[in-house]
């Protein structure tokens, strides 16, 4: 982002976790499945046994769970209008965030 002079606001979502309403909006706009937003590698994800729960969750349920702990959200989470990505993949950032 810095290399391409793309302006952004860095928010620590572990300390300043998005609300359930914000997450529901972003998930809805993204067109992605719910699992896309979960940090499936995280300790909390495993502790809560979310692997088996996420597939049957509603958007509202998933948003509430994600908003309960920022560590459950896959990072980085990039949002600009309806353009939303989670996790870091070099090719995605090079093609989508220039």
Image: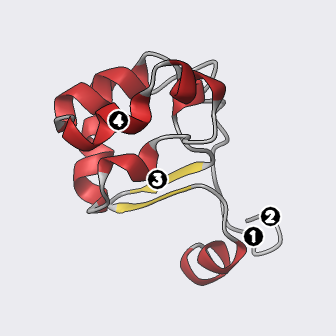
Comparing labels 2 and 3, the label whose residue is closer to the camera: 3
In the rendered image, which quarter is residue 41 located in? top right
Query: Of the numbered discs in the image, which one, if any, rests on residue 79?
Result: 3
Q: Verify CB contact (< 8 Å) between mark 4 and mark 3.
A: no
Q: Verify CB contact (< 8 Å) between mark 4 and mark 1.
A: no
Which one is earlier in the sequence, the residue at label 2 or at label 4? 2
36 or 70: nearer the viewer: 36
Look at the numbered disc 1 and give the secondary structure of its residue: loop
Alpha carbon of mark 2 to alpha carbon of mark 4: how far?
Answer: 38 Å
Q: In this view, does 54 lie to the left or right of 69?
A: left
Alpha carbon of mark 3 to alpha carbon of mark 1: how far?
Answer: 17 Å
Q: Mark 4 points at which residue?
A: 52
Q: Residue at x 31, y 32 (%)?
A: 53
Q: Which residue is drawn at 27% across and 43% down?
A: 55
Look at the image and tell me in which quarter the N terminus lies.
bottom right
Look at the numbered disc 2 and give the secondary structure of its residue: loop
**What x and y, as percent, mark residue 80?**
44, 57
Comparing labels 2 and 4, the label whose residue is closer to the camera: 4
Which one is earlier in the sequence, the residue at label 2 or at label 3? 2
Q: Verify CB contact (< 8 Å) between mark 2 and mark 4.
A: no
Alpha carbon of mark 2 to alpha carbon of mark 1: how far?
Answer: 5 Å
Q: Name the residue under label 1.
A: 5
35 or 87: nearer the viewer: 35
Which one is earlier in the sequence, the residue at label 4 or at label 1? 1
Q: Name the residue under label 2.
A: 2
Which one is earlier in the sequence, the residue at label 3 or at label 1? 1
Alpha carbon of mark 4 to alpha carbon of mark 1: how far?
Answer: 41 Å
Look at the numbered disc 3 and give the secondary structure of its residue: strand
């Amino acid at each position: 982002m810095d290399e391409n002079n793309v302006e952004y606001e860095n928010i620590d979502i572990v300390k300043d976790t998005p609300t359930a309403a914000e997450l529901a909006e972003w998930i809805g706009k993204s067109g992605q499945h719910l699992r896309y937003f979960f940090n499936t590698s995280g300790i909390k994800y495993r502790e809560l046994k979310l692997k088996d729960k996420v597939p049957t969750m509603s958007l509202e349920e998933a948003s509430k769970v994600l908003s309960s702990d920022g560590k459950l959200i896959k990072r980085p989470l990039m949002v600009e209008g309806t353009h939303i990505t989670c996790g870091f993949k070099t090719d995605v950032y090079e093609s989508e965030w220039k």
